[in-house]
């Protein structure tokens, strides 16, 4: 496991990318398939382009989260 203060690698395994990004494996594969997340194959391994992935995450819209319950009309 990587130290939290260590620099991020250029490419990360799927397991490491899930830890870095907080995404689940199924979602990662879906985003790779849709072309939103850049990955390369090295033999049987899937490696995620970390910098491109972080830039993609940063480009996503902010969450619109509202607190409390809505009052019945």
Image (cartoon, rainbow, N blue to C red):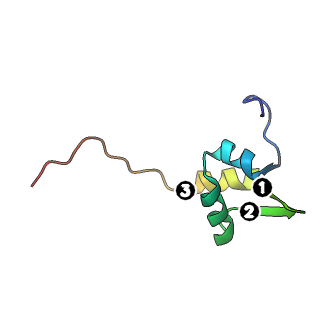
Q: State the SS at label 2.
A: loop
Q: Quadrant of residue 5?
A: top right
Which residue is painted at 83% across and 48% down in the image? 10
In this rendering, the answer to whether 9 lies above or below 7 is below
Which residue is painted at 75% across and 50% down in the image? 50
Few, some or many residues within 10 Å of mark 2 (<14, 14–19, 20+)? some
**CA distance for labels 1 and 3:** 17 Å
In this rendering, the answer to whether 66 lies above or below 42 is above
Residue 56, percent from left and from top: 64, 57
Q: Which residue is mark 2?
A: 38
Q: State the SS at label 3.
A: loop
Q: Is residue 73 left or right of residue 65?
A: left
Is label 1 in contact with label 2 (beta carbons under 8 Å)?
A: yes
Q: Which residue is mark 1?
A: 49
**CA distance for labels 3 and 2:** 15 Å
Q: State the SS at label 1.
A: strand
């Amino acid at each position: 496991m990587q130290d939290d203060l260590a620099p991020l690698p250029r490419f990360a395994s799927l397991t490491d990318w899930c830890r870095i990004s907080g995404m689940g494996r199924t979602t990662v594969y879906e985003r790779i398939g849709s072309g939103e997340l850049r990955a390369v194959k090295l033999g049987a391994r899937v490696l995620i382009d970390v910098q491109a992935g972080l830039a993609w995450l940063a480009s996503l819209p902010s969450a619109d989260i509202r607190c409390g319950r809505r009052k019945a009309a």
